[in-house]
Each structure stands twice: as structure tokens, then as C-alpha cells.
Amino acid sequence: MLETPRACLIARDLAKHVSFIAFGTNDLTQATFGMGRDDAHNWLSAYKRLEPTSLSVDPFRSLDRNGVGALMRLAILEARSVRENLHVYLCGEHAADTATIGFAQEIGANGVSCGPSLVPAARLSAGKAAAAMAR
């Protein structure tokens, strides 16, 4: 599980020892932003008013492509430079978000994993993302 920025940055070294990697997107988001998702709602709305272009979407609902996503993209590139056939998965609540699943497909993830209650939403989101990519 790559759940910290450092883990993403050393993905090349980690890939030498594993057959797959999985991004724990909830924890990776918390570590990248330096905040907990349980208290983020206390300040996110105020921050959006001050800097509306910085965070247009709650990063705990839809993956932040510019920060967290950049770390993931780098990790996949680095890890696959050592192990080309490495399988890559996304785990967590982000796995049920259509935009996040589309991004995961763009950067080369093989699949998503989420809790049982999110499986229907994840399946629907994966279908929407695949249809959008087919256009």
C-alpha cells in the first residue's frame, strides 16, 4: 500500500519486491494535504471562498489530481520502469467517484477496491469512465 508521499517517491525501489501496488487514497490524501478528513469540512468551505480555483472539489470526495494524483502518476511511472507488468490498484472511498476512476484509468491503474457499500457506485463509475474514454 502506498499511503504516504514518501512511499510514492520510492515506488521504484518498492516495485523490486512486490507483484502489485495499491494506493490507499484516503490516507494518501490526508498525508499529502496534512489534514484529517474528519475535520477537513471545518475549513474547506472557507478555503474555497478565499482560493476558489485551488480546490474546486472536496479532495476527500474526488481525488486531487494536481497533488495526490501527481504523486500517483509518478509512482506508477517509476514502479513500472522496474517492473513493467506491475498491477496497480486504487483503494478507498475515492474508488466510487467517476472522475477519480477516469483518472486512475488515464494513469494506468488496473482496478479499484472499495468497501462493500460502495461497490455499486464503483461499478457505475467505472462504466461511466470507460464510456467517456471510448468517445
Image: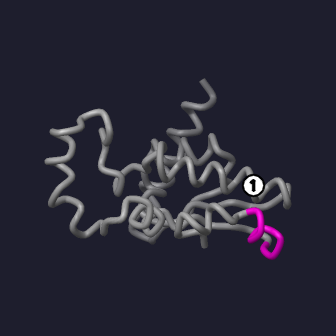
Q: Is residue 51 above or below residue 6?
A: above
Give percent across and percent down for residue 80: 79, 55
**Quarter in which the N terminus is drawn:** bottom right
SS label for mark 1: helix
Question: In the visual, does 57 lie left or right of 78?
Answer: left
Task: Residue type at mark 1: give it.
Answer: Glu
Q: Nearer the viewer, residue 89 or 72?
A: 72
Give percent across and percent down for residue 133: 60, 31
Q: Is residue 6 magenta?
A: no
Q: Residue at x 76, y 62 (%)?
A: 12
Q: Is residue 32 above or below residue 4?
A: above
Q: Residue at x 16, y 48 (%)?
A: 45
Query: Which residues are the magenta region?
Result: 12-18
Give percent across and percent down for residue 123: 51, 53
**Quarter in which the C terminus is drawn:** top right
Quarter of the image where one finds residue 57: top left
**Tag 1 residue:** 78
Q: Residue at x 36, y 64 (%)?
A: 34
Q: Residues within 10 Å of mark 1 (few under 14, many from 20)?
A: many
As drawn, the residue found furthest toward the top would be 135
Q: Residue at x 48, y 64 (%)?
A: 28
